[in-house]
Structures are given as structure tokens and as C-alpha cells.
Image (cartoon, helix red, strand yellow):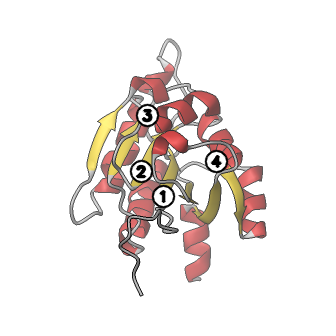
């Protein structure tokens, strides 16, 4: 029986946060700015592989926040090409070189999106994943805490009704994949 009395409901609204580390990049050449580093051949193959995985598993965000660094922009451009419809993407200067605390504040400012993808850099993205995850498959959690490889995707489910309520240890690790783990699973 449904209660329409206006009493507060026990329904928990879920948010999904996906963290994607940019794909493999070239080393900076002499005098070359770090933020202009481009993807390597492997990076250009890995980014669409993770995009295809996301599309196949319906991991399509409502909103994407992308670092302005060339490698992050290239990663997203190659990954989103695998989606039937591109979600709204915003380049945000605050992601570049941000630590977990700054990224947490940035995410807390997000409005309306139920699922959110952040494309950024280590150590900030890795540290944010470790900071947020409180539960989920123990083996996967240990792998996340050890390393977030290039093109690594961490999917975290959060029992939040609003991103402004985001806080450390709020999430459950839903999955952790990388192009290498995807290939290994199909062999």
C-alpha cells in the first residue's frame, strides 16, 4: 500500500560517480608544458576501448567534467565516440593538478546529474577514489587502493540525494576496470 500522506519516504536516491584517469601519454619533451602532453599509440587504443566498455555496460553519464589538459581532452574525445549519444561535457580548469579534497569540493557543486564522470589525473583521481570508497567487493577495493592505471575506470555508487552531501567514505565500489582487465576477462 502506498502512503500519500506526505510523510517522508524511505526511498534512497542514488548517485553514480565514475572516475576515469586519462589514457597513456608521451613524456614531456624539453620545454614542453605538462598540460600539452598527448596520448601515445597505446593511449589512443585504450581510450576507445574503455569508451566501448562504458557504452556496452550502459555506464553513460548525465554530465562529464574533463580536465583541460590535452591528454584528458583526447581521452574523452576518443571514449565518447563509442556512445550512441554524447553526454554534456564541461572542461573545468580546477581538475588539472587537483588533489582529492579539491575534486571533492568540485563534485559537491554539481547540480542535477544523477551520474557524473570526471576525467582527470593521478594522484588526485586515485586519491579521490580511495577517499570515497567505503564498501564493495574487497578484492576490487584492494586493487583500487594499490593503483589507478591509465584509462582506469572506477565506478562508485552513492546513496545521496544531492551532490552537495558528498563526503569521504560515502560510496560503494560498483566496479573497477582498465583496458588490460577487460582484455584479460575476454581471454
Residue 60 vs 132, above or below: the answer is below
Q: Residue furthest left?
A: 85
Q: Is residue 108 left or right of residue 136?
A: left
Tell me whether the residue at label 3 lies in contact with that at label 1, contact meaning CB atoms closer than 8 angstroms: no
Secondary element at image label 4: helix
Q: Residue at x 59, y 40 (%)?
A: 125
Q: Residues within 10 Å of mark 2 (few under 14, many from 20)?
A: many
Residue at left offset 77%, top offset 68%? 139
**Residue at the front extreme?**
5
Residue placed under numbered mark 3 in the picture: 109
Q: Which mark is residue 16?
A: 1
The residue under label 4 is 129
Q: CA distance from mark 2 to mark 4?
A: 14 Å
Q: Nearer the viewer, mark 3 or mark 4?
A: 3
Mark 3 and mark 4 residues within 8 Å of each other at the beta carbon: no
The mark nearer the N terminus, 2 or 1, is 1
Q: Earlier in the sequence, mark 3 or mark 4?
A: 3
Q: CA distance from mark 2 to mark 1?
A: 6 Å
**Which element carries disc 3, helix, strand or loop?**
loop
Quarter residue 103 falls in: top right
3 or 1: mark nearer the eye: 3
In x, y percent, where is residue 172? 64, 61
Left or right of 104? Residue 8 is left
Amino acid at each position: 500500500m502506498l502512503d500519500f500522506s506526505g510523510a517522508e519516504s524511505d526511498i534512497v536516491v542514488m548517485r553514480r560517480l565514475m572516475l576515469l584517469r586519462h589514457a597513456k601519454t608521451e613524456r614531456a619533451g624539453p620545454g614542453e608544458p605538462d598540460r600539452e602532453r598527448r596520448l601515445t599509440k597505446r593511449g589512443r587504443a585504450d581510450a576507445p576501448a574503455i569508451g566501448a566498455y562504458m557504452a556496452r555496460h550502459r555506464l553513460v553519464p548525465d554530465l562529464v567534467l574533463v580536465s583541460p589538459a590535452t591528454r584528458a581532452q583526447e581521452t574523452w574525445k576518443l571514449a565518447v565516440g563509442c556512445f550512441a549519444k554524447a553526454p554534456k561535457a564541461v572542461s573545468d580548469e580546477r581538475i588539472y593538478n587537483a588533489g582529492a579534497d579539491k575534486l571533492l569540493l568540485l563534485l559537491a557543486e554539481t547540480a542535477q546529474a544523477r551520474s557524473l564522470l570526471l576525467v582527470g589525473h593521478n594522484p588526485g583521481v586515485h586519491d579521490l577514489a580511495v577517499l570515497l570508497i567505503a564498501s564493495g567487493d574487497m578484492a576490487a577495493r584492494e586493487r583500487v587502493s594499490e593503483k589507478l592505471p591509465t584509462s582506469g575506470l572506477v565506478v562508485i555508487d552513492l546513496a545521496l540525494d544531492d551532490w552537495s552531501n558528498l563526503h569521504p567514505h560515502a560510496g560503494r565500489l560498483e566496479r573497477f576496470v582498465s583496458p588490460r582487465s577487460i582484455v584479460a576477462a575476454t581471454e
